[in-house]
Every structure is written in structure tokens, then in C-alpha cells.
Amino acid sequence: MIDRTKVWAGTLNEVALGGRAKRSVGFYDTTLRDGEQAVGAAFDPAQKLEIAKLVDGLGVGRIEAGFPRVSEEDREAIRAITQAGLKAEIWGFSRALVDDVEAVVDLGLRFCVIEAPISDPKLAALGVTREQVLGRIEKAVAFAVRNDVRVAFFGVDSTRADLGFFERVYRAALDVGAAEIAIVDTLGIATPEAVTFLIGRTREWVGDGVPIHFHGHNDFGLATASAIAAVYAGASWIHGTVDGIGERGGNANLPEIALALELLYGVETGLRLDRARRASERLREIGRYQLEPWKPVTGENLFVRETGAVAAQFHIPEAIEPYAASLLDTPRGIVLGKKSGAASITLKCEELGLPARPEKVATLLAAVKSLALEKRGLVTDEEFAAIVHRHG
């Protein structure tokens, strides 16, 4: 539960959103499967188990353990994850092929996403007709259901599919036993308005009894906005990954979506924001990638201040930050550089336990700015201590 006294977003959102029904949503994490499709990412079974535990610790409701037909290593990882006693439901992933589904069944998985391309460009690229893919979907879903697997049908590139064929395919999957459906923005091309339209239209004909998932990508930087639109259009599950790791521009970023939903919309997600930065840090170590330092939730610059005018307000966090650093379980800090001011010098001296005589602040600030310009970078604490010592 978020401490609302630590959220300083003002009242504009509440006014604008007034009258909207209270929502909740579940998170479906696909870091282990779709996330691993990021260029250069390759997780071994032990790493996949560790990532699954990290994700489970974040409080997501469902974890996609992997695609068994990829390799024996993937099957080994899935076995380990299913035996780890995690709180989340463990889901498998399969193409709409009976052999794929059989591999899921053999591992004892009770939940599975079954995918098939449904847009004309995807079908043409694979040399498959609409009728052929429809037949594959019906056979694969029916086989899974006969083997007591709960199926979510996943229409690849569904946001570019012909709307008539879109409805035909999803109805067919439901008719042979699919219990849930996933609407998939494979190339991240759907605007939030388009997501609202498509999920709302689908909700009308499937009714309230069929959970709808939304799986988004971030090619246009809209994944978070589209996920929020999906929630308000009636989606029950949002797919994504830690850090948005994934192919091309990445997947929807679950911690980032949770931050916006929880703090700005008051939507309960169950995600532990106070654990998100540690999970991100460990995933980056395993996956060997970096993030922008100004990235929401996990960026290293979020609660660090260099600018003097901002440092002067550092003692009043709500004046310079939209929410408390404690919500993410991370410290605040001052760094010194070209843009520092007198307040920055005083605060840094207090932090480091260094003497800061008022008559020396201007001299210390000039020395800091000079060194920062010379370095074209920040002045370290050690360098600043030497400056203070030098100028007495």
C-alpha cells in the first residue's frame, strides 16, 4: 500500500480523473522469454531461476518461465522455476503447434500462452494463409485444454490485424476452450487511443468473464501510456519486463507502469516499488546492459541534484521531487559540478563532515566550478575534500 503522504503530485490528476471507477490490475512478467530476446541477452538456467525469484519478490501475479521448445537449457530452467515454490503463477509459452503445447504439458505446466500471427504482413512473411493459421490455433488450443492447461490465446501483431479477422480468430480460440485472450502490440504501433478502442471493442463481445491481457512494446515510447489505457479499457493483465528489456525498443516496463498507476492513478498493482531498483540492478548485472541515468524508477539521477538553485530547496523534497525517495527505498544526494551553487557547497560539507565557514563558501564554489570545467564532469567527494583542505 502506497503512503499517499509521500506522493506530491498535486490535485490536478484527481480533478481530471474524477468519476472514473477504481481499478486494479495484475502484472504478467515476460522478462525470461520476451526480455531475453533483447540483442545480446542470454540467461543460463541458474540465472533464469534467480531472475524468476527477483520478479516474484516484486509481487507480480504471473511469471512466464519460458518457451520449452527453444532448448534443453530452457526446459531445465522451467523445471527449476516450477519447483522453486514461488508465489506467482508460472506460465509457459507455445506457438500454435501441437508439438509445442505437448512440450508444455510434459513439463507439468498448468498455464500457457499460445501464440499465432494474425496480421496479414506476418502471415505473408511466414507463407501461411488465414485459414491455415486458424486451423493451427484451434488444434493447439483444444489439445492444451484437453490436457488441463489453462490457455491465454496470444494473437501476434493483433494491433495490425484486419478487425474482422481479429474477432474471428479470438472467437475461434475461445470456442475451443481458451480461457483468456492477449491483445498484442508486437511492433508498438498502437496509440493509447487505439488501445482503448481495441480492448474496449473486444470487451464488448467477450463479456466480463474473459480476462483480457495487453502485451505492448515501446518502439514509439508509448508502452507505459498504452498499458495505462489498456487498464482503463478493461484489461485484467498487463505484460511487460523489468526495465522494459526486450527486442528493438523494448517491452513495456512493469515497474514504470506500476509507478504511474499507483502514484498518479491510484490503481493497485501489487508491485513492490521499494524492491524495483535492486531487481533492476541485479538484472543489469546478469544481462550486461546499461540504462539511461534519468530513467523513471531505476535511473541513478532521480534523487541526485547538481544544480545550485535546486540544491537550495533540497531541504524541502516536495518542492523538487514528485514523490519521496523512500517509496523506492533509495537515498537522496547532492553532487558537485559546473552547475553547483552556494547551497550545494554547504550541503556537501555537512554530508562529509567538513568545515564550511560562510566566508569560504564562495571560494570553495569557484574552485569546484573550475575543476568541473577542467574535467568536463563532476567533482568527486575526495576531490572536494582536497579543495576544502587546500583553502582552509
Image: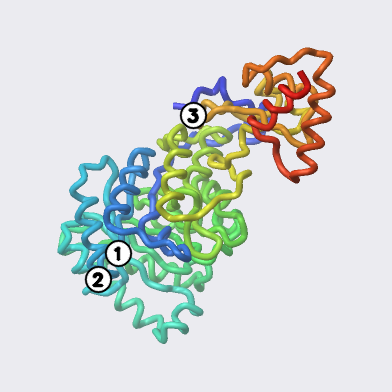
Give the mark nearer the N terminus: 1 vs 3.
Answer: 1
Position in image of residue 278 (x %, y %): 44, 38
Q: Which residue in the structure is indicated by mark 3?
A: 329
Residue sitting at 73 percent across and 23 percent down?
388
Task: Please state which amino acid type lies under the numbered disc 3.
Answer: Asp
The residue furthest front is 390
Q: Is residue 298 left or right of residue 390?
A: left
Quadrant where the image shows the N terminus:
top left
Position in image of residue 147 (x %, y %): 15, 62
Whether the residues at callouts 2 and 1 have beta carbons within 8 Å, the answer is yes
- Secondary structure at badge 3 equals loop
Give the Cα separation between the discs numbered 3 and 2.
42 Å
Position in image of residue 352 (x %, y %): 62, 21
Residue 101 against residue 327 in the figure, above or below:
below
Quadrant where the image shows the C terminus:
top right
Residue sitting at 49 percent across and 79 percent down?
120
The picture quadrant where one finds residue 132 is bottom left
Q: Toward the viewer: 282 or 200?
A: 282
